[in-house]
Image: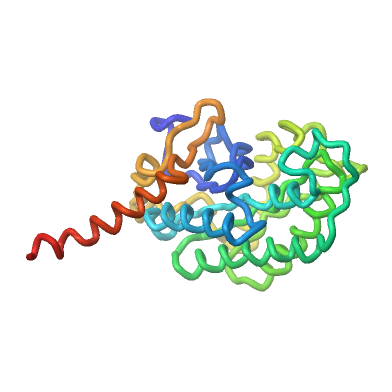
Amino acid sequence: MKDENINLNHLLVFGDSHARSFRGSQKYLPFFMGPGKKNCFISDQTYNHLKRNLLRVLSEVNPFTSIMFCFGEPDTRYYLGKGWQPWLSTETECVANIEKKIYASFSRYSNLINTISSDFDFQIYVLCVIPSIRKTQNLYVKRFNLLLREYLERTPDIYFIDIEDHLLDGNGCLKQEFQADPVHANSAIQDLVDSNLMEIELCQNKLTYDNGVKNAKNLDFIEKYFVFDQSFECYRYKYGGLAVKALDFFSVFLNRLPKISSL
């Protein structure tokens, strides 16, 4: 989707590489925040990296916008103990303290959701962690989703988009019709998400795709922080590493300009 096709009725989707499942849509506008191994919840370092970048972007998104998050799968992949490409490994899948590790990832993710909910006036949706073709990984996915579901059931006005059961076959693997590759779901999941959102609308009498049109939503943040990635067919966050540090430096510098000019 290119700039000229953007309209104010899109649901903004922020995520790791799973955001690509929402490309080519007239309802969703996907934003790829970067590779899952750097934008996940396996450590405080990766969590703080994602949180810093996401808060920077969201600070320039208009209030009352509807947004959806899709994170979490990379954590369950990494916890297989085979690195980031488990399908290339023949090692036995066995990870110690897996419950503790999944809970730590959930805690960081829920803290991020809570921070954004407290700091901004957005309508927030959270997509379930998407399963893969690996059965053992999907056991971790199921546990992660259970924790998210229980947390969001206790959290007013934040809605869990739970399509996990619809994605799994009888063997506990991602159904073939939803597979883009061994890890990612394809755009066919959009219909499932649509149905889930419609159920929420009917129950809550909400206009899911309104996105604050009456509030003249500003889309300038896209040009500032993202570049359209032709291969992914979505917007990719264009800052990372030294670029983020440079952006932080100039932000501080600009904030000091009034003081300098007044001397």
Residue at screen point 52% across, 45% down: 33
Can you name the residue that lies furthest to the left here? 263
Camera-side residue of 95 and 120 = 95
Quadrant of the rendered image containing residue 219: top left
Camera-side residue of 22 and 81 = 81
Give the colour scheme shown.
rainbow
Residue 202 in sight from this viewpoint: no
Residue at screen point 87% across, 45% down: 135
Tag count: 0
Residue 237, percent from left and from top: 47, 42
Camera-side residue of 23 and 181 = 181
Residue 137, percent from left and from top: 81, 48
Residue 83 in sight from this viewpoint: yes
Residue 124, percent from left and from top: 55, 59
- Quarter of the image containing the C terminus? bottom left
Residue 88 versus residue 57 in the image, above or below:
above
Residue at screen point 63% across, 46% down: 37
Q: Is residue 261 shown left or right of residue 61?
A: left
Q: Is residue 170 shown left or right of residue 222?
A: right
Residue 10, percent from left and from top: 49, 44
Camera-side residue of 154 and 76 = 76
Residue at screen point 48% across, 37% down: 235
Q: Is residue 226 shown left or right of residue 146?
A: left
